[in-house]
Image (tube, rainbow, N blue to C red):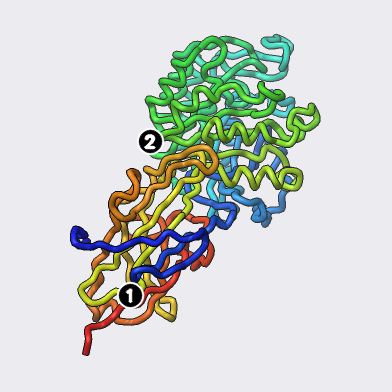
Amino acid sequence: MKIPIAALTLSLAIVPASAQTQSANRIVVQPKDTGVALVNPGMGWQLHHYDNGIRRYGLELEPSDTVDDFPGLSSIYLRLAWSYIEPEEGKFNWAIVDTPMQRWVAKGKQVAFRFTCSESGSTQPYATPEWVRKAGAKGYFITPGKGIDPEGKIWEPDYDDPIFLEKLDKFLAAAAARYDGNPHVAFIDVGSFGVWGEGHTYSSSRLPYSAKTIRTHIDLHKKHFKKTLLVANDDFISQGRGLETLLYARRQGLALRDDSILVQPGEQAYHSAYVAPMFWPDLPVILEGEHWGNSMKRGYWGDGSRFLDAVEEYHASYVTAHWYPREFLEKNRELVRKVNMRLGYRLQLLEASWPAEVKPGEPLLVGYRWRNAGVAPCYPGGHPAVTLKDTKGGIAAVFVDEEFDVRMLPVGPPGQAVPVGREMKGQSQASRPLIPFALPPSNILKPGTYSLYISIGDRTGTPTIALPLPDDDGQKRYRLGTVVIRGAAS
């Protein structure tokens, strides 16, 4: 219950950063960002577990090693050829997926998938299972770098072939029955078209499929994955298909991915930032770096600053460490730190205020200003909550500001995003009035001194988003100070 505030006139002190003062019976705090790397829903660093086959990169890790020392790591990425999972028609090897998945799920992390139908490695002549070809599906033998080659050892399907599409349809149905809507799955790429699932055939058959082919593969995924976020590759527009493909993907609710950042140097490090505004205001953008070691050998990586530039220009929510994770981290610690300060959303509490004491019949009148210091909106959204705890750490009261959704916080260049908050009327066009929380009866919230915590979470006050604040209670609530709740005069 909220109490009207028309008759309330309290002044809000302006104080130096990180200070805490008491003025006009109000405590004001302005905490600094701790600089900590945050792991939050819908964003973060990813590690490639399976990539270009089932020999790298996460397979170098011990089963007990989930690279907990990688700052901001939120998920792992499993890129697997269809043939590994369904080596015989209707017989599935889900353990190849579920085994690494469970290692990271046990640590509170997520997974993301790409199921591919064409690869280029000599150890993977059939990314689409050979039994699909033997069932009559048309396709082409290829030699990477040469294109279609009757003497080639690698087989790529005709992506429009009806038999191929029928078998793919059944495979996606089985995968969706297992993973669609699973809260541990962050997203799934539409990876059934193109070499490496990247949405082009430049390094395989070189055939220029039409936009209709792309729509077919998007539709097959949408048919089965009705809950989990699907992702379109920026290369869907390549080979003359144009923006129509990504416009269609956007209309179908797909997010955007761009692979191989810094596969070329300098200004050619990435090419598709211009399409990102079609997606990032509402849906996350995922960036995959080029295989780091390869980019380094060619002299393209440099200090990684162009990778950070891509995070800014695409408004990225996820990025990948596309290499052996600890080697990548050791050589790129400063880059990882900089990326973590901007990647996805970063909700900074710039200021909070509340009464030093609350007398019977008065509300707990709270003010705050928030800023999203990241490059992307907080897509999951969330509401500020104030929690009072007693001296034993017990939750004595919870107050949720349901009208304030952090999803609305705007983004901007570093340090320039517009803050939004609850302050005194007339202070800011971007702000709302202080919010009064009515206290429970004294037999529920007893008189005394309580620690006051702030959090962002759901409408019931359950925290869901980590904040760059000190004094975490271990459940994403952050202590700001104390408040005295007065009892009736005796």
Q: What residue type is labelled 2?
A: Lys
Q: In this view, does 239 lie to the left or right of 459?
A: right
* Front residue of 122 and 327: 327
Residue reaching furthest to the bottom: 490
Q: Nearer the viewer, mark 2 or mark 1?
A: 1
Q: Distance between the residues labelled 2 and 1?
A: 50 Å
Picture coordinates of residue 289 (x, y %)?
A: 65, 33
Circle 2 residue? 226
Which is nearer the N-term, disc 2 or disc 1?
2
Above/below status of 367 relative to 141: below
Circle 1 residue? 357
Q: Which amino acid does label 1 sit on?
A: Glu
Residue drawn at (33%, 43%) of the image: 429
Picture coordinates of residue 59 (x, y %)?
A: 70, 44
* Front residue of 96 and 29: 29
Above/below status of 40 relative to 87: below
Mark 2 closeness class: few <14, some 14–19, many ≥20 residues within 10 Å: few
- Residue 366 visible in the shown view: yes
* Front residue of 441 and 367: 367
Q: In which quarter of the image is the N terminus?
A: bottom left
Secondary structure of residue under mark 1: strand
Residue drawn at (66%, 51%) of the image: 70
